[in-house]
Image (tube, grey):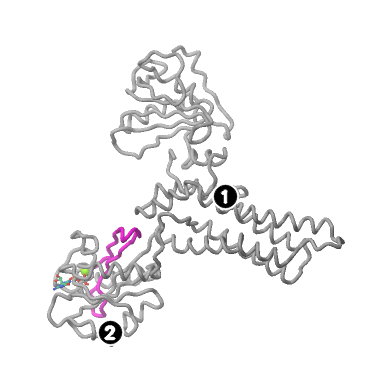
Amino acid sequence: MSDANLHICVQPAAEATIAAIATPPGPGGIGIIRISGSRALPILTALFTPKCNTRQLRSHRLYYGWIKNPLSGQPIDEVMAVFMRAPKTYTREDIVEIQCHGSYLVLQDILGQIITLGATLAEPGEFTKRAFLNGRIDLTQAEAVIELLQAKTREGLGLAMSQLQGHLGLIVNSIRAALMSLRAVIEVAIDFPDDDVEIINAEEMGAKLERDIISPLRGLIKSAGQGKIFRDGISVIILGRPNVGKSSLLNALLREERAIVTPIPGTTRDTIEELLDMKGMPVRIIDTAGIRDDAEEVEEIGILRARKKLAEADLVLLMVDGTQPPAPADTILYESVGDKKILLVVNKSDLDGHSLSLFEAAFPGVPKVAVSAKTHEGIADLENGLFALVTGGSSWDPGYSCVPNVRQKASLEKALTAARGVEQGLRADLPPDLLAIELQSALDHLADITGETTTEDILDLIFDQFCIGK
Ligand SMILES: Nc1nc2c(ncn2[C@@H]2O[C@H](COP(=O)(O)OP(=O)(O)OP(=O)(O)O)[C@@H](O)[C@H]2O)c(=O)[nH]1
Ligand SMILES: [Mg+2]
């Protein structure tokens, strides 16, 4: 190709053609570079020599060939390349994907050529942001993409998938449609204030408000609470006096010898954190230094760390040695936990002299479970007990539900408050223009969820969570 064909095009930011490496850093079987925007095809044409000698690349077809330096003609890599013409693409713009060998250097070289030919480096999440701005997906689906990428368990993935299919957007839009039909009636009442006919039938409107708006909003808010634990997971801390078996329990839960276990009290000096999948719930489990008064210096620091971690934990596994009678130190620890959820783990059930009933008497009403961290007896009971404590024993099936995230839940709550305002206004016979204000506020908060009125700041916050190339 001659130099004359290599004109570099500088485009305004909104229309800029963007490019990024879409696969994670590090060597891999293949690496993918993605380009989106009006210059995607000219850039590919300048770099790519297909084996089949075609003049024009057809859309949505995968071609085999070589990426070459457009100036020197020097081959850079043997690749598969695809051009996808807008609008049937991820961003609704023209897209090119180049599958090359998964070498960081090759990927960097090709990306460098693409930038030279006029593309800009994509920001994190910019491809998905364009999909949203170009109307292919709503904001709930864009957020689902982040969740899908970050899901830690199958259940978390199920939630993300359901949201990616747009289920939440559909429900929110049906609530909005109901609000709009109420607003239409109220607007008629505003326009004809002296009409003899009663336009607003408070009872009928109240019933519709409850059935089509308030009740589904409540349902969504409730499932947000339940879903949070499957999406974001929980943090569980193992606390107890030295030598009760905390590290052994960590190992038993992880099913690997992660932490050092010895008969010497004060073995664990630092906190140890690991992530595990407990019945679909991502659980960050934290083993801590055994807490005692006469600890030496390093151990003392570990104990301070344990106390700090306690503040962040959602649930405490308070571990005791079931072969020893309850000690005042156990009670002091129990009291230090405050109002956090707690499960008393009475360990060493494999040994003679183990007694659950002694602890029943000392800690009445506290959920407890007998286990042997050594033989793994009772570990399943512990997992069930922990799960029940966290979920409140609900038999909710996360995989198929519509579960709003924290941001969406906050908007749903504001919409619910506004909808309740309308309900109260109807009962108090407020003038229609005041009802209209509350109704509009509910509509605005719902529009925030799907992204119709979301501010640039919030969009930035959302898309900043993405990785580059997505
Ligand atoms: N028989 C029996 N021994 C156990 C059990 N759990 C732990 N042990 C033993 O108790 C000792 C202490 O276990 P660790 O898991 O290190 O206890 P820890 O609470 O982490 O102790 P520190 O880190 O020192 O606070 C080790 O000798 C373990 O083998 C159990 O369920 N049964
Ligand atoms: Mg330990």
Q: Position of residue 164 (x, y in %)?
A: 47, 46
Query: Residue at 49% across / 41% down in the picture?
Result: 128
Q: Which residues are magenta?
A: 269-297
Q: Quadrant of residue 229?
A: bottom left
Q: Position of residue 17 (x, y in %)?
A: 52, 30
Quarter holding ligand 2: bottom left
Q: Which mark is residue 302?
A: none
Q: Position of residue 286 (x, y in %)?
A: 30, 65
Give whichever of 94, 156 is nearer the camera: 156
> Which residue is identified by label 1?
450
SS under mark 1? helix
Which amino acid type is marked by label 2?
Answer: Glu
SS under mark 2? helix
> Which residue is identified by label 2?
360
Gap in Å between the C-alphas at discs 2 and 1?
51 Å
Give whichever of 300, 387 is nearer the camera: 387
Is residue 180 in the magenta section?
no
Bin the neighbour count of mark 1 within 10 Å (Cα to Cα): few under 14, some 14-19, many 20 and up.
many
Query: Residue at 43% across / 54% down in the picture?
Result: 400
Q: Quadrant of residue 297?
A: bottom left
Q: Is mark 2 within 8 Å of ligand 1?
A: no
Which amino acid type is marked by label 1?
Answer: Thr
Q: Position of residue 14 (x, y in %)?
A: 58, 35
Q: Is residue 143 above or below residue 354?
A: above
